[in-house]
Amino acid sequence: MKRDYYVTPKSSWLMRQFWRAAGGDRFILERATYSDQIKYMCLGGIIVATGVMAGIAGVRILHHI
């Protein structure tokens, strides 16, 4: 039987980690639309990238002191 409603794709491990970094609720996001899932994934990616860049800058400044 063919389904008449949209089924969101299964979320990957990396997507769930970015959701966690963004503070999203996995239970809600797994049932949300794909655009909302991507939105939270991008937000989590921005947060992780900012943290990585801050860590690199901190290591560099401590290395030069």
Image: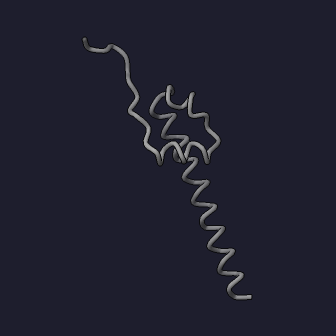
Q: Residue at x 56, y 42 (%)?
A: 19
Instruction: Examine the image and state in which quarter residue 27 appears.
Output: top right
For this orientation, the residue located farthest to the left is 1
Compared with 34, 51 (above or below) is below
Q: Residue at x 51, y 34 (%)?
A: 36
For this orientation, the residue located farthest to the top is 1
Residue 62 in the image, given as x and y percentages of width and height: 71, 82
Q: Residue at x 50, y 25 (%)?
A: 31
Instruction: Examine the image and state in which quarter residue 64 appears.
Output: bottom right
Quarter of the picture containing the N terminus is top left
Residue 48 in the image, given as x and y percentages of width and height: 59, 56
Compared with 53, 25 (above or below) is above
Task: Using residue 4 as the reference point, say whether residue 29 is left or right of it.
Answer: right
Task: Using residue 55 as the reference point, say whether residue 35 is left or right of it.
Answer: left
**Snapshot colouring:** one colour
Quarter of the picture containing the C terminus is bottom right
> Is 35 in front, or is 52?
52
Q: Residue at x 62, y 73 (%)?
A: 56
> Is 44 in front, or is 1?
1
Residue 13 in the image, given as x and y percentages of width and height: 46, 45
Task: Using residue 46 as the reference point, say whether residue 54 is left or right of it.
Answer: right
For this orientation, the residue located farthest to the front is 13
Compared with 17, 29 (above or below) is above
Residue 34 in the image, given as x and y percentages of width and height: 45, 32
Task: Using residue 56 as the reference point, say whether residue 39 is left or right of it.
Answer: left
